[in-house]
Image: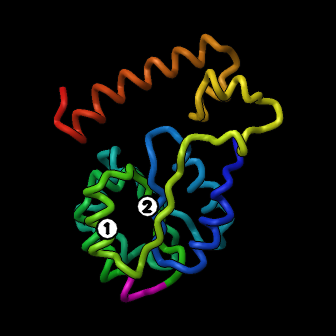
Amino acid sequence: MIKRQLQAHISSLLKQFPAVAILGPRQVGKTTLAKQLAAGRKDTVIYLDMEKPADRNRLADAYSYLQSQQGKTVIIDEVQLMPELFQVLRPLIDEYRKPGRFILLGSASPSLVKGVSETLAGRIAYTELTPVATTELPKNISYNSHWFRGGFPEPLLAKTDAAAQQWMQAFIRSYVERDLENLFGVN
């Protein structure tokens, strides 16, 4: 696991804001980081992934479900898949304005940021998690490896160059086939 420089900064934001959004590309470690941050909290943590049908079903009546989780930290992953949640979060936060109540993870799409900033202004702080920087490299990973494997944690930590290459090829293919189509309507 790679310790991210933003961890301390996000931890301080969680002490001030009711909601903190960690935005960034897929597979940079947003979920891992959020779970690490949540593990250090005193309250119970609920993790919801909007790509899982069971978790989406829990939020069929999002207001009631999230209200019943008051006093807990709720991580909502892939939040951009349910933008209607932002309108639900505003009154929940206003009714119980506890710092670190919600950690929202997702892509930094312009529509997501615009929707959240309009609805949750003054209630949310944003951070962007980028791929691993050279200043974050563990001692056992060289700059050379970073250069050839990139900054995504999975290929960076792969045991072999071949495994890193396979991961990067699969990632690029799925990114082109899925994310570009969703973002720009390109197929």
Q: Residue 180: x, y in percent? A: 27, 34
Asked which quadrant contains residue 161, the reply is: top right
Q: Which residue lies furthest to the right in this view?
A: 139
Q: Residues within 10 Å of mark 1 (few under 14, many from 20)?
A: many
- For badge 2, the amino acid type reads Leu
Tag 2 secondary structure = strand
Q: Residue 171: x, y in percent? A: 44, 25
Q: Residue 116 carries which label?
A: 1
Asked which quadrant contains residue 179, the reply is: top left
Could you tell me if the residues under marks 1 and 2 are in contact, i.e. CB atoms within 8 Å? yes
Asked which quadrant contains residue 62, the reply is: bottom left
**Residue at the spot x=60%, y=15% of the render?**
163
Of badges 1 and 2, the one in the foreground is 1
Tag 1 secondary structure = helix
Does residue 64 appear in the picture of this structure?
Answer: no
Give the side of residue 140 with respect to residue 105, left or right: right
Above or below: residue 169 compared with residue 41 = above
Q: Does the magenta stretch include residue 71?
A: no
Tell me the distance, in whole angstroms, between the alpha carbons under discs 1 and 2: 10 Å
Q: Residue 85: x, y in percent? A: 28, 66
* Residue stretch in magenta: 93-97
Q: Is the magenta stretch mostly helix, strand or loop?
A: helix
Q: Residue 104 carries which label?
A: 2
Give the side of residue 74 with respect to residue 11, left or right: left
**Residue at the spot x=73%, y=39% of the render?**
137
Tell me which numbered mark, 1 or 2, is placed earlier along the sequence: 2
